[in-house]
Image (cartoon, grey):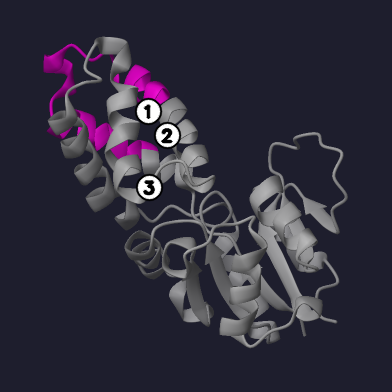
Amino acid sequence: MKDLFFDLDHTLWDFEKNSREALAEGYDQINLNSRGVGSIEDYIEEYERANAWCWLEYRDGRMDKAELRGRRFTLALKKWGLEHDAELGESLGSHYVETSPYKTHLVKDALEVVKEFFERGHKLVMLTNGFEEVQHIKVERCGLSPFFKSVLTSDALGVKKPNAGIFKLALELSNSSAENAVMLGDSLESDIIGAREAGWGQVYYNPLKIEHNEEVLFEVSDLISILELPLSK
């Protein structure tokens, strides 16, 4: 019976929907409109662009956790000339971290898939590049925690996907082996290529059907299809 290692954000937890709800609440609570910031939609678009860049910098070791939390917001405000307002960026960052993890929207069929694999007898482990204190809240609040043996974060382990070190640590902490491990995630580079290079099996969740030239063991565009894959042996 294969040990299944799931990514969290964008794979099980609906990051986009949850994040946008939290951002809209922060926009209203901190009254960004009164500071000249455009519509909520404009603000969210700028934030998502800044956040993607900051996470790439963080993943590659060019930005630390503390800097990321505030800087993604100051960068998002650059369009309106507020990029040097560090206090505003910190306020928005604090509100977001205190709000978004408590959102409970899951990707379609996520709970059904996780529950079914659990009932089949698979060992389920969460392996995520997120922050330690945040990811555990998400898993608990959205009802996933009863099905997972553990939640392993890059923040706690000190190494991020796709670095081979995090896959090695995950095996050690889960009492598993590369031959018996399968990584399920939405990031071709971090989850799939990282797992493949570590000798694991891979299931690439690719809902947008993004074209690529990588060799992947399994690929699906919806989570429910994962239940049909031969992952028992």
Does the magenta segment cover residue 163? no
Residue at the (23%, 15%) spot, across then down? 37
Please tell me how many numbered marks the rendered image carries: 3
**Horizontal side of residue 44 vs 229, given as left or right:** left
Which amino acid lies under the numbered mark 3 shown in the image of this protein?
Asp
Secondary structure beneath disc 3?
A: loop
Residue 26, quarter of the rendered image:
top left
Q: Residues within 10 Å of mark 1 (few under 14, many from 20)?
A: many
Q: Between marks 2 and 1, how big is the CA–CA gap? A: 6 Å
Name the residue beneath numbered marker 2.
51
Which amino acid lies under the numbered mark 1 shown in the image of this protein?
Tyr
Residue at the (81%, 66%) spot, across then down? 228
Main SS, magenta region, reads helix
The answer to whether residue 23 shows anywhere in this view is: yes
- Closer to viewer: mark 1 or mark 3: 3
Disc with the residue nearer the chain's start (2 vs 3): 2
Name the residue beneath numbered marker 3.
64
Q: Which of 33/133 is in front? A: 133
Name the residue beneath numbered marker 1.
47
